[in-house]
Image (spheres, rainbow, N blue to C red):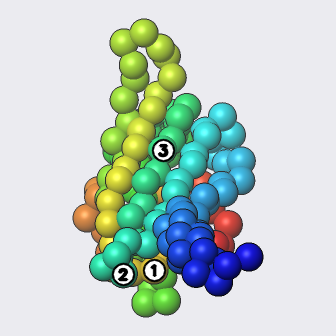
Amino acid sequence: MNAKFNIPVLIILLIFVSSCATKVDFPVSKTVPEANVTAKVKKDGNDNYKIDLKAEDLTSPERLDPSREMYVVWIETARGTKNIGKLNISSGMFSSKRKGSLSTTTAFKPSRIIITAENTSTNNEPGTFIIVSSENF
């Protein structure tokens, strides 16, 4: 094979592999076993991390025992646990499935994603009511 051909192919492959998102796995929740949570984490060109999280079939937080006001998403990083936002849950007009999503960008490299049930979204630390937590990635 021609060496001039191999270098561009290797560069393209390297760009493709480095631009792939990490799929984050979540085990079945013990609190809300019907919940289906998926996430993708991708490092961008500015060394930030884009997080796209989707959740289906989470019960309304008011129906939990004890009831809560909302779900909050957290990431574990080398610098501690960070609040990345409230997970808004909605029901579709033509479906009873409750869906939620959160898309955000952070400068902190995440190693785990956690969803908790909270009464406020402005906490600096997660409460003890953990709904689901990903494996380390």
Please name the residue shown 49% across and 67% down the image.
19
Q: Identity of the amino acid at label 3?
A: Lys
Foreground disc of the pair 2, 3: 2
Q: Identity of the amino acid at label 2?
A: Asp
Please name the residue shown 54% across and 75% down the image.
8
Which of the 4 quarters of the picture holds residue 134?
bottom right
User: Are the two marked residues, 2 and 3, in contact with CB atoms closer than 8 angstroms?
Assistant: no
Secondary structure beneath label 2: loop
**Structural crowding at the residue carrying mark 1, measured as other residues with C-alpha within 10 Å and reported as few (<14), some (14–19) or many (≥20):** some
Q: Upstream in the sequence, badge 1 or badge 3?
A: 3
Q: Identity of the amino acid at label 1?
A: Lys
- Front-most of 91 and 2? 2
Mark 1–mark 3 Cα distance, whole angstroms, equals 19 Å
User: Are the two marked residues, 1 and 3, in contact with CB atoms closer than 8 angstroms?
Assistant: no
12 in relation to 3, above or below: above
Please name the residue shown 35% across and 53% down the image.
103
Residue bearing the label numbered 1: 109
Mark 2–mark 3 Cα distance, whole angstroms, equals 23 Å
**Structural crowding at the residue carrying mark 2, measured as other residues with C-alpha within 10 Å and reported as few (<14), some (14–19) or many (≥20):** few
Q: Is residue 47 left or right of residue 13?
A: left
Task: Farthest residue to the bottom: give it.
Answer: 79
User: Are the two marked residues, 1 and 2, in contact with CB atoms closer than 8 angstroms?
Assistant: no
